[in-house]
Image (spheres, helix red, strand yellow):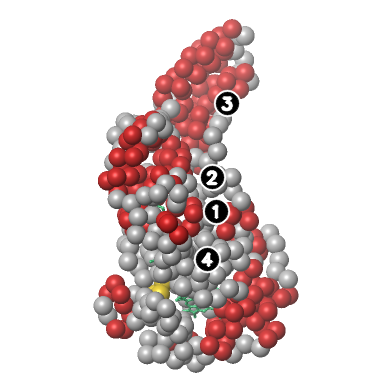
Amino acid sequence: MTERSTCNVVLKKCRATAVRFSGHLCGISRPSTPILSLRFFASWRLCGYSFISAFQRSPFSRTKPVLAAVLLFVLIAATTQHPEPVQLKIPAGWPAPTYDFSKNPLTKEGIALGRKLFYDPILSVDSIVSCSSCHLSYTAFTHVDHAVSHGIRDRIGTRNSPALMNLAWSGLLMWDGAVNHLDVQALAPIAHPDEMGEDIAHVVEKLRRSGRYPGLFYDAFGDATITGERMLKALSQFELTLISANSKYDRAQAGLETFTDQEASGYRIFKAHCIACHRPPLFTTGAFANNGLAVDTVYHDLGRMKITGDPTDSLKFKIPTLRNVEFSFPYMHDGRFKSLRQVIDHYAEGLVQGRTLAPELRDGVTLSKNERTDLVAFLLTLSDREFCFNPDHAFPRE
Ligand code: HEC
Ligand code: HEC
């Protein structure tokens, strides 16, 4: 074989591999003509595939591959995109996310910036409270020891901090749906006088003055301009990566693990009484419902009606996910229940037959003591320890 034809063979092999890698593993779209383009080299690098090793296996002479490899390495370095795009891994069998990523494409640097902001008390007026003060990663991003939120200067809010996960699939946010997009959600806690008590313009000012942030915004957005919009988008990027989909329930669905008899019995009860609202795989429909709680005596919170003004929405609250519910106590919008057993006792014994009570609950839920225990056992299969202890979600140590 001449050197030229050997080279052609190698290139063909490279092309095939590049197409395979770029098309399937990385989720990068396959180009119509399989030319060995710069984009392929870049996507190869993304895949972590060693280009050099392909050459090492080729029948080239010893010196030429080294030279070629160095050249290619330089090319790869020059063509790798910064910020580096990140493709969100959608769990198998899940619906398409509702979040429009085309308006805020995820990048490695954007996510890192969002994570830094999420853990930084610079967002609050007293520089003590960060998002993570009320949304702690080890407890599925909620505030475990408080019924209602605890913000700046020890101020107490009126609602329980919800667990944060699978936000790429969420519709309206907050217990009453007051916020309609993740990219603006953070404005609410930043400005809330009982949460962070800050002014967004002042936060932007503080970030501009800080030593660290201009560089991080440069990495994430290609220039060092700090704006409120960029800050909010970066926060969203980090929050969108918080995907919980590896619980025992998920593994049982995939046939990798089996439920105990008690969990299987709990699952049957769940399907009979709970699944209409807490629908898998998200364990919520994202809708609002009155699940029969008595109106709370302290805040008289009417939920969704506060936003819509519609009396038929009175006492309707957002149906929360039940994923990681083992960690997200206390429960309900005001944190009134401390244990899952109390929640189930509420459904079995405490339903208040109000005007707006959900039709699914009007006939009541009859559960024996054993059935209640089985139902708790099933709810515990929704715990995803990998999610709660994922080092990529925790405080970013440098
Ligand atoms: C002082 C406690 C506190 C702080 C600080 C806080 N939150 Fe929250 N978070 C809450 C509470 C309480 C709610 C529910 C509010 C409501 O329903 O009115 C909430 C709701 C949310 C939601 C909506 C979740 C859903 O499923 O509807 C998101 C997202 C969120 N917070 C993200 C953040 C981010 C990002 C920050 C930092 C910028 C932050 N939070 C700071 C307490 C807090
Ligand atoms: C009609 C819809 C509906 C049905 C059916 C339903 N739920 Fe709920 N669930 C809700 C709503 C709405 C909330 C939040 C209510 C609030 O905070 O005011 C909730 C809250 C919860 C919570 C608290 C979660 C948290 O993070 O605070 C748990 C646990 C729960 N439900 C379990 C169940 C179980 C178990 C069943 C079956 C016996 C069930 N639910 C049936 C609508 C429903």
Among numbered discs 4 and 3, the one appearing first in the sequence: 3
Q: Quadrant of residue 265?
A: bottom right
Residue 276 in view: yes
Amino acid type, callout 1: Ser
Is residue 104 visible in the rendered image? The answer is: no
In this view, the residue in front, 121 or 101, is 121
Residue marked by disc 1 = 137
Q: Amino acid at mark 3?
A: Ser
Q: Secondary structure at mark 2?
A: loop
Which residue bears the numbered disc 4? 146
In this view, the mark in front (4 or 3): 4
**Residue in the image at 48% along x and 78% along y:** 276
- Inter-mark Cα distance, 1 to 2: 8 Å
Label 4, residues with CA under 10 Å away: few <14, some 14-19, many ≥20: some
Q: Residues within 10 Å of mark 2 (few under 14, many from 20)?
A: some
Q: Residue, x 48% and y 36% (percent of image)?
A: 22
| Between discs 1 and 3, the one toward the N terminus | 3
- Residue 286 sits in quarter: bottom left
Mark seen at residue 108: none
Q: Nearer the viewer, residue 118 or 32?
A: 118
Could you tell which of marks 1 and 2 lies nearer the N-terminus?
Answer: 1
What residue is pinned by disc 2?
A: 395
- Residue 138, how many percent across, how many down? 58, 55
3 or 2: tag closer to the N-terminus: 3
Query: The N terminus is located in which quarter?
Result: top right
Q: CA distance from mark 4 to mark 1?
A: 15 Å
Q: Residue at x 50, y 30 (%)?
A: 44
Q: Depth check: 105 or 185 in front?
A: 185
Q: Earlier in the sequence, mark 2 or mark 4?
A: 4
Report which residue position mark 3 lands on. 50
**Disc 2 residue type?**
Phe
